[in-house]
């Protein structure tokens, strides 16, 4: 039974800056083709141009003017699904300078750092612009995302990617975005007013905790994104020792797909495992400190081998057993 075509929906208002279009595909838009083996191809629609693959070619004109969600057949008989790319698909296929924040982590940051419409958010660094796209979509045109990036070549890649996703007119960018070249530790204090959220995607986020505390509103959230356990330990302990934040919450997320086919239901062979650790903590009001933890640290947690920041309420380390006055057993 054939389906009755639905009436064309109006496009998403340009002032929403969503990075999304409704209605027929048009010249200048990016599309995502998926072949019968699941291979993906992203490209910009251009009148009169052709897409080539090992399955022959496709004319862009065959796709322009059609509603997304259709199948096209190439000159050599290959079939392709045609859709506009989702944000999660765009960021893993866009050109990269620095490594991207994966969609699973960007989603966790937006949800658990509570990025809301109108929020004033600071991120360091901008990388390739993947997280920036999620932050800008969350704050909307009424919020503010200030991105600090140390490396000019990374900042240029991030700008191109963000402008491409949001379909920014030539010479302009998302109205809520302020991309700055420089060090967060210096530039953050130069911002006017306080901020609501600070996202630290950098090698040494613990060196920015003091300046983050100075700039965050009471109840604001700092979120660190780090790759290794040593970085995780250092940033958590620095937040604890500072005293102006709630108990840090560290975690990671692992995503596994599933194979579902009749009675054959099992875990898939592909998994997005460890990409990074995330840590969040909330800013206390000026002069206030969180309640002291009642649970004792595990034995040896802050022993002689531990060299990181040390909470002030811990007892002093005992003298090594068996040492004489001259320190020799």
Image (spheres, helix red, strand yellow):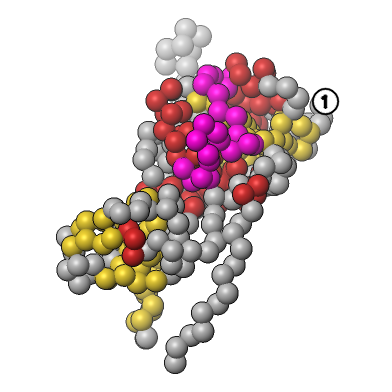
At 55% from the left edge and 35% from the top edge, which residue is drawn?
173
Query: In the rendered image, is residue 233 in sight?
Result: no
At 66% from the left edge and 26% from the top edge, which residue is drawn?
212
At 63% from the left edge and 36% from the top edge, which residue is drawn?
175
What is the total number of numbered labels drawn onto the structure image? Answer: 1
Question: Considering depth in this image, is 87 or 49 the residue closer to the camera?
Answer: 49
Pointer 1 residue: 287
Determine whether, in the image, residue 90 is placed left or right of residue 208. left
| Crowdedness near tag 1: few (<14), some (14–19) or many (≥20) residues, C-alpha within 10 Å | few
Question: Considering depth in this image, is 151 or 298 the residue closer to the camera?
Answer: 151
Could you tell me which quadrant the N terminus lies in?
Answer: bottom left
Residue 173 shown in magenta:
yes
Where 304 falls versus 169 (above or below)? above
Determine whether, in the image, residue 39 is placed left or right of residue 1. left
Residue 279 shown in magenta:
no
Quarter of the figure with residue 179? top right
Query: In the rendered image, is residue 96 in sight?
Result: yes
| Direction top: furthest residue | 326
Where 286 falls versus 323 (above or below)? below
At 55% from the left edge and 77% from the top edge, which residue is drawn?
6
Give the x, y percent position of residue 37.
26, 67
Give the x, y percent position of residue 298.
57, 41
Give the x, y percent position of residue 174.
59, 38
Quarter of the figure with residue 189? top right
Give the x, y percent position of residue 194.
74, 27
Secondary structure at badge 1 equals loop
Q: Which residues are magenta?
A: 164-185
């Amino acid at each position: 039974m054939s389906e009755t075509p639905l009436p064309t929906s109006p496009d998403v208002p340009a002032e929403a800056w969503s990075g999304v279009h409704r209605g027929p595909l048009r010249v200048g838009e990016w599309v995502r083709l998926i072949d019968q083996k699941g291979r993906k191809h992203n490209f910009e629609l251009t009148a009169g141009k052709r897409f080539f693959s090992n399955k022959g070619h496709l004319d862009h004109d065959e796709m322009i003017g059609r509603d997304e969600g259709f199948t096209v057949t190439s000159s050599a008989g290959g079939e392709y699904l045609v859709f506009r790319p989702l944000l999660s698909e765009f960021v893993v296929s866009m050109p990269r300078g620095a490594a991207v924040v994966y969609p699973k982590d960007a989603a966790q940051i937006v949800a658990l750092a509570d990025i809301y419409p109108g929020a004033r958010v600071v991120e360091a660094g901008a990388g390739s612009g993947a997280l920036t796209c999620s932050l800008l979509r969350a704050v909307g045109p009424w919020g503010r995302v200030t991105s600090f990036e140390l490396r000019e070549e990374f900042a240029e890649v991030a700008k191109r990617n963000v402008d491409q996703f949001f379909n920014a007119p030539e010479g302009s960018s998302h109205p809520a975005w302020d991309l700055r070249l420089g060090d967060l530790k210096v530039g953050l204090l130069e911002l006017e007013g306080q901020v609501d959220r600070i996202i630290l995607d950098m090698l040494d986020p613990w060196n920015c905790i003091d300046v983050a505390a100075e700039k965050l509103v009471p109840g604001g959230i700092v979120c660190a994104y780090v790759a290794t356990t040593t970085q995780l330990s250092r940033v958590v302990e620095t937040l604890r020792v500072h005293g102006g934040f709630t108990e840090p919450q560290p975690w990671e997320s692992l995503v596994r797909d599933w194979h579902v086919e009749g009675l054959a239901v099992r875990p898939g062979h592909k998994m997005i495992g460890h990409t990074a650790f995330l840590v969040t903590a909330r800013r206390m009001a000026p002069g206030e400190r969180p309640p002291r933890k009642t649970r004792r640290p595990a034995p040896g947690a802050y022993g002689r081998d531990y060299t990181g920041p040390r909470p002030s309420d811990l007892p002093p380390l005992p003298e090594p057993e068996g040492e004489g006055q001259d320190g020799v057993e």
